[in-house]
Image: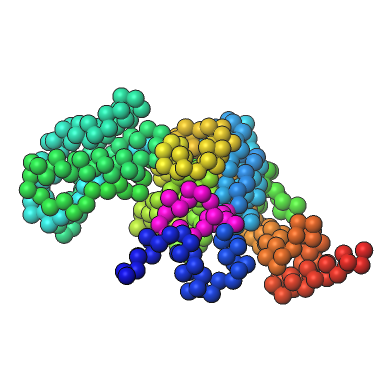
Amino acid sequence: MTQLPFYRLPYGARRDQLAQLAHLTVSQLATIAARRQNGDDQLIENYLTTYGLPEGVAVNLRVDGHEVVVPMVTEEPSVIAAASNGGRLLASREGIVTTVDRREVMGQIVFNHVADSTGLEAWLKAKSQTILDVANDVHPSLVTKHGGGARSIRVRRLPPHWVSLDVFIDVGEAMGANLVNTLCEAVADYIKAHLKVDVLMSILSNYATHSLVTARVAVPVTQLATKTVDGATVAEKICEASDYAQVDPYRAVTHNKGIMNGIDAVVIATGNDWRAVESGVHAFAGQSGQYRGLSRWWLGEQGTELHGELTVPLALGVVGGATRVFPLVAINQQLAGQPTATELMGIVAAVGLAQNVAALRALVTEGIQRGHMHLQVKSLALSVGATNTELPAVVARLQAIKQPTMAQAQAALTAVRQENLRK
């Protein structure tokens, strides 16, 4: 009898096979079973269980004159606290102001082994309107009902023998990946019917340079003061740290990672493709030929205001995709005030800017670890099995230790439990 491929095995058979292979215990199998969700087995292949991440909300954020509550999904303890603290630091009448000039997703049809790239480019440009019409005929409702559609084309010749036809498409309120792929394949079929060409691929690009959002803010330097450092000094150091991230790629990567802590958490919570956002944003950070910090901070002419700016490519959507599959996405959209796709881009960029200022302020004053340690200690206590009622006492013991270890956390938990038994 032929053995079925792994992906065709019933769920129980796959689970048992993995349990035997990895020597999973009864307790571990119970954990897997407890997190299993009906329907998730239809979303991915070789489904085992559902891996959950904590969700919270960032507060204190004012974006384009409106207070917003921002749902965030992350496993890192300090992210939501930093976003909320950054929102407080950047509080003003308008708060963080955002702009989105346009929101278009790019698809590309790549031609391979092109002998006459000049001739192909000329033909494509001459047929530009026809190409746009072919794309729009695939989903006419995108134009008639949603005000979107293919907007323009661009032709790029790339050595040694490639030509890329780039089609820029307004996908309405959707994320639009599948839509763009379908339109590009239709355009490729049209071109192949009229020219003898070798089409290598037809696919969207996640480098969303036609979906840029900019978040800007200006706040009095006095708002940045700490208990030990005046606001003017803090602002000056933030600007110096910002400048340093423009010249040192080793620092720039960590600078941008901090920004993406906030951006990714909101992108995940709203059901968008955080992997696409990550790859596009980091490509944008290296567009000059050197990888640089995404944000810039500088002092105003009088030195009394700190100015900040962040520009990132964010091709986000609020309909389709995961928004139909995961019930929490719809709830999270409601928590955020039911933003349009463009408004969501602004909120996400604002969170990134708030995250950045909170991190820089901590770095140039008390250091990053002091702010992290309380939350990290809580995670350490939970990891050794402290319950919610035991947590405060265990954390209090661990906070007296400069760099607590797992063994010390276990010892603290044991001591707390012994104390409780004596009460």
Give the overall secondary structure of the magenta segment.
loop
Q: Is residue 148 left or right of residue 415?
A: left
**Residue at 47% across, 40% down:** 323
- In this orientation, which residue lies closer to the viewer: 284 or 414? 414
Residue 311 in sight from this viewpoint: no
Q: Is residue 193 left or right of residue 90?
A: left
Could you tell me which quadrant the C terminus lies in? Answer: bottom right
Query: Where is residue 121 drawn, in percent x and y?
Result: 13, 44
Query: Where is residue 18 drawn, in percent x and y?
Result: 48, 69
- In this orientation, which residue lies closer to the viewer: 41 or 367? 41
Q: Specify the quadrant of the image occupied by residue 417.
A: bottom right
- In this orientation, which residue lies closer to the viewer: 297 or 270? 270
Residue extending furthest toward the front: 1
Q: Is residue 89 left or right of residue 43?
A: right
> Does the segment drawn in magenta span residue 36?
yes
Label total for image: 0
Q: Specify the quadrant of the image occupied by residue 195.
A: top left
**Residue at 51% across, 33% down:** 339
**Residue at 12% across, 57% down:** 113
Q: Which residues are magenta?
A: 34-53
Residue extending furthest toward the top: 144
**Residue at 51% across, 70% down:** 19
286 relative to 2, above or below = above
Q: Specify the quadrant of the image occupied by residue 286.
A: bottom left
Q: Is residue 362 left or right of residue 419?
A: left
413 relative to 198, above or below = below
Query: Where is residue 312 drawn, in percent x and y?
Result: 44, 46
